[in-house]
């Protein structure tokens, strides 16, 4: 490609809206442009990167025997009504009507569609295992689309679905996908970790998320320093902490003016935070869940939702609190209404272990002291609902843990029979008996993988692409396009590299050398070849690696061969 | 691929809804499935064909220097309001709102999006010519989706857009695309014809449609038997026909009971149809157009719409007719209201040449005879508004013409400055003066091309794929999977062909030979290799060409080489 022909409008300034590095650099390097909130165009260089990731995904999927199909983006509402998810999915699903008033959604995922697609035609256990996949735009109407391609409303996803006759088959299909995903992210050059995760909206039992580790990641990942335990913090179940036993004192109500936060309270009472028990209230599909945890902990709302059951979880509104005798800022189980079908009180086991602690009195400006939950809390349910913290230990082996941020670039699910049951999709087993398919589903965020790679590989000058997903592998920079000798050398080398199947950009623009160097660094070609005055005089060129800044000077004749060797070496190491 | 693993649910019966051959065979051969009206899933074999067509399109686009991008499917309404097409596009555009109530459409085309995408960044004549393209799903809410992939509501399209500094540049860009399209359809093996066409909704001046010639085509194509004139019948302007001069008789009103059709009238009056002048009335954006043509002709509504101007054309409602003094079944300019801004009378020049003819009297059950339009029609406009017929002659050279049906698989447009003007998208020319881009746009119906190929190449047994777009090039059929010798030969040959890069399916299913033969014919693999009892005994296999039914028996050792030669020969001839 000639840079003079390439449509790549680089920017001098980064638009203020771009908060994370990947978003900033993709805009600045002319790879993407925004068309609406969370909706982007991929310009030529961006499109090339996406296509390279797609090609890797497709190769690895095909290698597993998965078969590519293409389902519609526009899905009829009926199948979502059948599964019960039309309303469950909520405002995140884009919905529309056709000219006849029929309802459709823009697929956020395709469990309903694939299950109804194969039911009646995938009839026999002999046709299993079967895994089908597709690669296409997906749609989610995020409340606040942000971080460019990391949380957009239209994005490219690879989604796959497996069909097995039993759980054992599912475990195998799952493992095949798990391994393929590992190869895919290896080849994309990502530093990633598969972690245990929560199955959330999709449903099912076992699931792993593939997390690209990066500060900009929105997910918190817990991993053990000793064993191979790793989980999304939402899924991690922390150990219950003990506290030194004390003799129980008598419960006592105390005035605590302006102490609606734990910080206010500990300052006012001059007590350690571990002695406080705080309350957080949620509205789970209309049911009030009052959650009690130790003051230094945070609630894991996913754990709460899973425990209570339901499609949506939100902070409880003041009216809902009042209806159950709760006073915001001073809530506790004491003096609360009795739990029933619309109200549950959940106490974390570590909070249960507090002796003579402090908690709300359900009266504005008052708390109780000398609270011992096992004695003072009535009608409660005990369940682990706190988030794991850096100070916790590994729940498997007890060693210290690390907390890191991750970008979820893939997820594999064991769905089981959730969809085949609700959609009445069965096959005949060896005994001629109808059974629901045992299903798995598997997703990769293709465009998000692109963003994750940039989050991991960049410096202050720009992007540093792993070679397998770089828009071009090599950029040739003649320092002056007016110098015929330089341009001759550049042209010859360009032709040579192209003939060798190396994706090369020749920067033939009539720009200052500094502009070309800056653009090459910004766009992040793995290899830069500079052709300057010495090149003509000494018949050498300078080869520079973007990743390491290593520079070597080689003779023009050896240049193409040397570039090929470097690329092969980068490829072998997925760098 | 092993047939036992392939997800390809063939059908015994053809669903009643499928009217055309391509739709029938794609359903029957397990290539597509319907998910909603005009909305389909492509199963593995169907997806493979689409991907092959996409690959050909991409190669030929890239070869022209066009650069691939990916614009969003979901487009914000604002840009369509800016261009004035939000309402103009009408009910054919799928519209939706996000959770904040913002309007979007599912792109039926991308002129607005690409123009606003590059404006402010494609700033200089030095960056031109520039052609950008993409391949993705497009959406049109057809009133009556039908014929499977030929008129669906979600379909894959390649759309390209060129930007030039002047008309001369546009002509060149247009020609480059025109030539690339010819190569694409050649490689897809289609029998096609580029024809002059009407630019319709998209706007602009010169345009050609690429028509795949097939009986199932919904378009009528006129082509000259002598010169290279070829046009969509909507675009073809027929010559004005003369009639023998006669002495004019006096206008006379006559009773014509039950003669509201031309057939009734000619039977009742026992006159030749050429002596009648019939009326057809349209509502063009609320304006009434009364169209007068000779009784044996048909109105070209596209010509009428172009002449009148406006976005929509529909048959005029009875109230609209009454408001202008017209009596349905007996309409004519005589006694009609005076034309004004809401009413126009258009008379075709051939109708003008009738002497002493018959036309309506605008009175139920009455006609006028001895009508001579040049004397009797007042306040009229003369314009060619009739459709060309088989009996017409070529408007260029006067030779006889042919009328054939065509499937529009591609279209190229010279848009000019229509969108760059309405969207204020300008560049600076050599003199530093701001000018609107001179644009072209170019579309290929990828999934429709797949259907067109089947319409052209099939027989009573099934599809006959051109080799370049076949799902697999070769199918190996061992007559019995229980015969180890046969399976050994089949397995060895399968491995050999795959190693040679030949896309091969091995039918290893435990089915009767007849089922396998039928499936192979239905699916339409270009080459079938049969391995039967003789194969083991005589070390030979039978190679059969689907296209010609030619059979040859070759030794097992020579089989792979012979297959490669046949494929190369098919490829060279785009067969």
Image (cartoon, coloured by chain):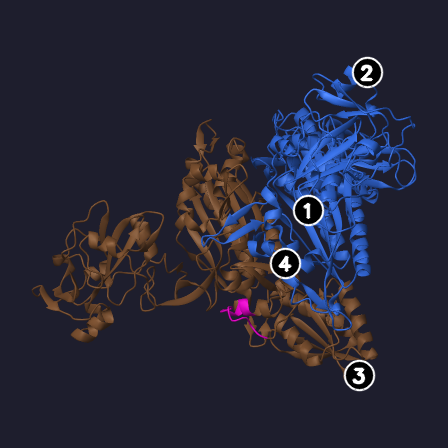
Chain colours: A blue, B brown
Choose top left, top right, bottom left or bottom right for residue A489.
top right
Residue B7 occupies which quadrant of the picture? bottom right
Q: Does residue B191 sit above or below B486 in this rendering?
A: above
Q: Report, in whole angstroms, how far the alpha carbon at label 2 lies from the one at label 1.
A: 43 Å
Residue numbers of the magenta segment: B13-24
Q: Disc 3: which chain?
A: B
Tell me residue B361's x, y (percent): 15, 62
In the picture of the structure, the residue carrying the numbered disc 4 is: B52
Quadrant occupied by the N terminus of chain A = top right
Instruction: Using the image, tell me which numbered label, if any, was put on residue A201.
Output: 1
Disc 3 to disc 2, C-alpha distance: 98 Å
In the rendered structure, find residue B538 and report the number of the disc placed on it.
3
Q: Chain of mark 1?
A: A
Q: Is residue B225 visible?
A: no
Q: In the image, B87: left or right of B497? A: left
Of the two numbered discs 1 and 4 in the rendering, the one whose residue sits closer to the viewer: 1
Q: Is residue B164 left or right of residue B232?
A: right
Which SS class for mark 3? helix
Please report, as a chain letter, where disc 2 is located. A
Query: Comparing marks 2 and 4, which lies closer to the viewer?
Result: 2
Extreme residue in the left direction: B250
Q: Which residue is mark 2?
A: A270
Q: Chain of mark 4?
A: B
């Amino acid at each position: 490609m000639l840079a003079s022909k390439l449509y790549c409008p680089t920017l001098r300034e980064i638009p203020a809206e771009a908060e994370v590095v990947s978003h900033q650099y993709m805009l600045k390097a002319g790879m993407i442009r925004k068309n609406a909130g969370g909706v982007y165009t991929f310009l030529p260089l961006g499109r090339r990167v996406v296509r390279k990731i797609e090609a890797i995904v497709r190769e690895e999927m095909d290698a597993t025997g998965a078969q590519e199909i293409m389902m519609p983006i526009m899905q009829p509402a009926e199948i979502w009504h059948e599964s019960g998810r039309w309303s469950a999915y909520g405002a995140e699903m884009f919905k529309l009507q056709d000219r006849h008033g029929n309802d459709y959604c823009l697929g956020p995922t395709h469990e309903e569609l694939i299950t109804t697609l194969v039911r009646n035609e995938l009839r026999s256990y002999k046709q299993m295992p079967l895994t089908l996949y597709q690669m296409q735009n997906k749609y989610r109407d995020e409340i606040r689309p942000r971080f460019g391609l990391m949380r957009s409303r239209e994005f490219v996803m690879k989604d796959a679905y497996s069909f097995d006759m039993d759980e054992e088959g599912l475990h195998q299909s799952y493992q095949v996908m798990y391994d393929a995903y590992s190869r895919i992210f290896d080849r994309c050059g990502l530093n990633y970790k598969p972690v245990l995760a929560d199955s959330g909206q999709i449903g099912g039992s076992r699931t792993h998320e593939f997390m690209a580790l990066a500060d900009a990641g929105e997910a918190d990942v817990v991993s053990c320093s000793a064993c191979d335990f790793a989980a999304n913090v939402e899924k991690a179940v922390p150990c219950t902490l003990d506290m030194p036993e004390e003799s129980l004192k008598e419960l006592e109500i105390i005035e605590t003016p302006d102490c609606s936060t734990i910080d206010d309270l500990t300052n006012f009472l001059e007590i350690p935070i571990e002695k406080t028990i705080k309350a957080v209230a949620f509205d789970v599909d209309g049911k009030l869940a009052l959650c009690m945890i130790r003051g230094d902990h945070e609630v894991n709302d996913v754990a709460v939702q899973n425990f209570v059951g339901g499609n949506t979880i939100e902070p409880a509104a003041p009216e809902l609190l009042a209806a159950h005798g709760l006073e915001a800022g001073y809530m506790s189980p004491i003096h609360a209404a009795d739990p029933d079908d619309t109200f549950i009180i959940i106490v974390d086991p570590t909070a249960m272990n507090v002796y003579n602690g402090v908690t709300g009195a359900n009266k504005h400006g008052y708390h109780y002291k000398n609270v011992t939950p096992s004695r003072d809390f009535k009608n409660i349910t005990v369940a682990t609902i706190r988030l794991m913290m850096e100070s916790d230990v590994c729940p498997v082996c007890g060693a210290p843990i690390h907390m890191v941020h991750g970008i979820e670039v893939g997820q594999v699910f064991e769905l089981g029979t959730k969809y085949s049951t609700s959609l009445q999709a069965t096959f005949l087993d060896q005994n001629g008996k109808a059974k629901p398919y045992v299903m798995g589903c598997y997703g990769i965020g293709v465009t998000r993988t692109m963003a994750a790679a940039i989050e991991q590989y960049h410096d202050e000058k720009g992007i540093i692409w792993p070679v397998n997903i770089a828009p071009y592998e090599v950029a040739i920079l003649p320092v002056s396009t007016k110098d015929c000798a330089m341009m001759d050398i550049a042209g010859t080398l360009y032709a040579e590299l192209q003939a060798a199947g190396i994706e090369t950009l020749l920067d033939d623009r009539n720009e200052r050398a500094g502009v070309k160097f800056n653009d090459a660094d910004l766009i992040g070609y793995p290899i830069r070849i500079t052709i300057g005055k010495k090149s003509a005089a000494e018949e050498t060129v300078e080869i520079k690696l973007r990743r390491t800044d290593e520079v070597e000077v080689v003779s023009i004749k050896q240049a193409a061969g040397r570039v090929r060797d470097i690329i092969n070496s980068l490829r072998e190491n997925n760098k």
